[in-house]
Image (cartoon, rainbow, N blue to C red):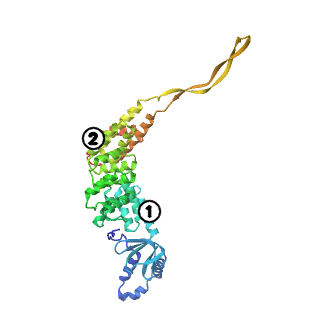
Amino acid sequence: MMRPLTRHRPLAKGLSIAVAALAASVPAPAAAAAQERPASDEAAQRAVDDDRGRARKRVLTLRDGQTVRALARSSDGRWEYKVDGRWRALPADAVVRDRLEKDLLSEMKALALELESSPDSNRRVALCEWMITNGLKAEALQDLDRVLAQEPHQPAALALLARRPLVAVPSVDVPAGEVEAARDELVTWGAQAPTAARELALNELGRLADRDALREELERQLRHGSLRRRSFAAHALGRLFPGQEVKNLLMHAVLDPSEEVRRSSSHALAAAGTPAVVVPVVRALNSADERVRLQAAESLGNAGYAAAVEPLMGHLAAVTAQAGGTRRVNHGNIFVGRQFAYIQDFDVEVAQFQAVADPQVNVLIEGDVLDAGVHSVGRFDFAYQSKVVRRSLQQLTGESPGHTARDWMRWWEQNASAWRAADHSRAGE
């Protein structure tokens, strides 16, 4: 069930309104003067009216703020649009503005081009709101997906989705006996939805009165076999119950086999707002298990706590030193060859007045003995661990001093004192 959209003012007036305002501004005694306006203006108006009479892809803005994006035309002073092969008419005064879809898309591309080099995500969100206002909801959802993929807690994007629902979601406004079924349907829908639509599902879940039952359901979903359900449950716990269920989220942030679930769980830990929640993740950097060390470094980057920079730098230094201590990989010998059996001689034996030739079989070996060096797994581990740690450091600091561990070590030597003196008590700082 879709709730009605909030009414809002159009960003620009349509040509029809401008023409109407111009006609209204002409005084009654000046009717003769109006008849003397240039023929080019009359021709332009006729061209506009003729174009409106043609069926073209348009976006019609209604008086209540909603938009209709469809094949549309104006007939006898009323707008009609095509749905399922049939034309449906709108009330005569329902449409306050009409724009060709191709013109809006061209304008959108021009505005997006101006933002390509801007790191300010708030400007991107403002463009998304412009798209929604002008009926380009599908394009707005795609852009909001990109914004939230980079900044899961972007305030302007979350506020926009709370204010302007873009798609219909399963509603929890049901009779008391059907609330549980409606909640389960909404959780299932949200688990399969893209990033921005997930936020709409969370907004609807947040309206449930029984918070304890909702929390228990999300805990159960966090143990589900489907990675999409686990990911959605982790995201919902961070959004609706920040700072709670930390133990379960820590486990999934480091140990879950799915990268998507680990990322969602780490983002949920960021919602707690205190670096203390990732202390167990920092300790996991010293795990004997290589996979745990890698995923712990990855989780610290996704959680966004800048206080984790120093532990990550220490881990990077340890990994680099360990790799530097092995100058020569393990070597061994390998033989590549073949064997031949041949009769080397005969022993003659005499028995019962008869001579018997007893063959002497020998073996000839032919081949080469080679010195073989097997590249150890440890050298590959160093390269991959270093890459993961450097990526997390870049996420936390916003810096990019280079593509090697040595570049980052030099950066740390120059900035360690200032970094330690700064306040990193919250995620994202």
Q: Is residue 277 above or below residue 336?
A: below
Q: Is residue 30 left or right of residue 82?
A: left
Q: Is residue 323 above or below residue 197?
A: above
Distance from label 1 to label 2 (Cα)? 43 Å
Instruction: Give the percent coordinates (x, y) of residue 131.
Output: 39, 65
Question: Mark 1 = which residue?
Answer: 109
Question: Mark 2 = which residue?
Answer: 420
Total labels drawn: 2
Instruction: Give the percent coordinates (x, y) of residue 175.
Output: 29, 67
Q: Is residue 347 left or right of residue 17?
A: right
Please, what secondary structure does the residue beneath circle 2 have? helix
For residue 125, the mark is none
Tell me the quarter of the picture where residue 358 sits: top right
Q: 166 or 252: which is nearer to us?
A: 252
Q: Is residue 80 left or right of residue 173?
A: right
Tell me the quarter of the picture where residue 188 sits: bottom left
Q: 334 or 176: which is nearer to us?
A: 176
Instruction: Tell me, yes or no, if residue 352 can be seen here.
Output: yes
Instruction: Give the percent coordinates (x, y) of residue 315.
Output: 35, 37
